[in-house]
Amino acid sequence: MTLRTQLVLLQVVIVLAIVLTVGLAAMLMQERQIREASQERMIAVAQSVAQLPTVVDAYDDHDPAAVIQPIAELIRDSSNVAYVVVTDHDGIRFSHPNPERIGEPVSTDPSVALSGEMYTGTQTGTLGESWRVKVPVFDEGGAVIGQVSVGILESDLRADFLGDITGFLLALGGATVVGVIAATGVARIVRRRIFGLEPEEIRGLLETREATLHGIREGMLALDEDGRVSLCNDSAARLLGLASPAEATGRAASDLLEDLTLVVAEADADDDPAQRLVLSGERVLLARAASVRVKGRRVGTVVTLMDRTELDHALRELAGAQSLAEGLRAQQHEFSNTLHTIGGLIELGEVDAARRVVERAGDGGALNRLDAPTGVEDIELAAILLAKRARARELGVVLTVTDDSQLPADNGDDDLSTVVGNLLDNALDAAGQGGHVRIALTQENGEDVHVVVEDDGPGVPLERRGDVFRLGFSTKPADRQRGYGLTIVARILERRGGSIDLGPSSAGGARFTVHLPAVQHAGTAR
């Protein structure tokens, strides 16, 4: 059975149930009203006859029926009742629609009326079953001398009821037909609204959508017209640091990630997809937003979140490896030239000159200054410093590691590598060609690590020092995505319970002082 047929049948059943219930209630009320109206009319007729002086006086005549019968028949015809029967206190009739019944006792019990009470009910008499009223007749002294019985045949009541109900039944039938037609139209509208799909097809589409939505690696957010999240998949919840997608539903995008409002605003303003890098905690995400329009009206925005953290980390490692390789090639050329010089001096017999060349080259090339005597024994951090020194040479910057720096081997702190790498990148860019960058690292007895990085660049104005850790802020040209390194450093330190201070350097540039709690003390290091 199709959805349309089911909708029509269900609504028809509802319409029929309502129509039958209302019709039955209306018919019962109509029947009750007819009986109540007939009863009031019979009581009025009976009491008027019982109180009529001519009728009461006729009880003392030799032949009461001669006076009472014409009056009773006249009242019966004018009041539209079946009969008006007047009896004495023994129940002998003084009037009856059939004159042959005059003088006979009544066929029903007259005791209630003769006791001075009024009786109302249905009884079967000589004319058939009737709805009747019996009232007592009192003389001038207040004694009961007879009764007046007024009735309407049940067949006449049924005829009146059926005559009134015919039009009502026709109205109910018309309402039923209109309800069925309306149900058919509603079913057609509903089917058009759901694109003609059947419930099984809708369920299949929903299951497919859920499987696709929660199975893809990228995060997906759907925002309504007010910028609140109406849909969130598992990946988006993970990237945003939420326990489940349900936590995001109904919340404003700015509550989840402040930078989301920027990319959504850009997409809504241009009606074109917009994208930008955003930070969620320490994750670097690529947020891509696109407005959704239905028939020219904007109904919301879809935001795709892609994790760039691993990619950026791999790119940084690749850049470091490339810098290291270039440094090694430069060192190879440097040593080749030195060997050629020494060889030439020996051939010329200039042994002293050759010895002086050897002494000058005793320090080696650009990569031999981070040996064990410098105190930086951690191999990973030493590799980062070597790579940054090679990059510094390319930029024409002198990178110096202070002699008092010391860091034990196997420090095992990935956060320290991230902090040092970002601070050195920032300092190298600030120093520029011909500049100088100095770094000092200290850690004693496995305690907290202290890092100091300073340069001789232009420095940071006092009024802007509070902005350098804000996401997206940079004093450098906007030739590429900037303003993320120091923000990541600040968030790592916040998570680890550390601190970072920015002040002026003795060389005229900026000085960053970092306090990073040891791994075993922090308990939250990655």
Image (spheres, rainbow, N blue to C red):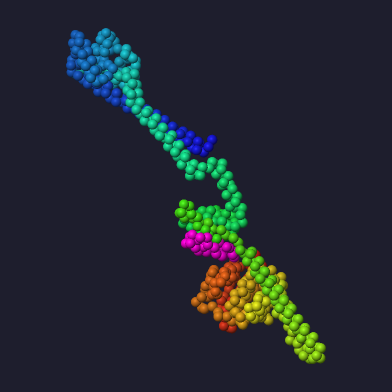
Q: Viewer-proximal residue, 18 or 337? A: 337
Please tell me which residue lies in front, 274 or 300: 274
Q: Observer-nearest residue: 99 or 316?
A: 316
**Looking at the image, which residue is at 62% across and 64% down?**
309
Image coords of residue 215 (percent x, y)? 61, 53
| Quarter of the C terminus within the rendering | bottom right
Query: What span is colored magenta in the figure?
Result: 258-287
**Image position, residue 193 (x, y; %):** 48, 44
Q: Looking at the image, can residue 446 be seen? A: no
x, y percent for residue 156: 32, 19
Is 347 located above or below residue 22 in the figure? Answer: below
Residue 152, position as x, y percentages in the image: 30, 19
Q: Is residue 351 above or below residue 92?
A: below
Left or right: where 25 falls relative to 320: left
Picture residue at 56% right of the left edge, 65% below the top: 277
Total labels drawn = 0
Q: Residue at x 51, y 60 (%)?
A: 272
Query: Does the magenta-highlighted stretch encompass residue 462?
Result: no
Residue 489, quarter of picture: bottom right
Location of the N terminus by quadrant is top right
The residue at the point 55 percent across, 64 percent down is 276
275 is within the stretch colored magenta: yes
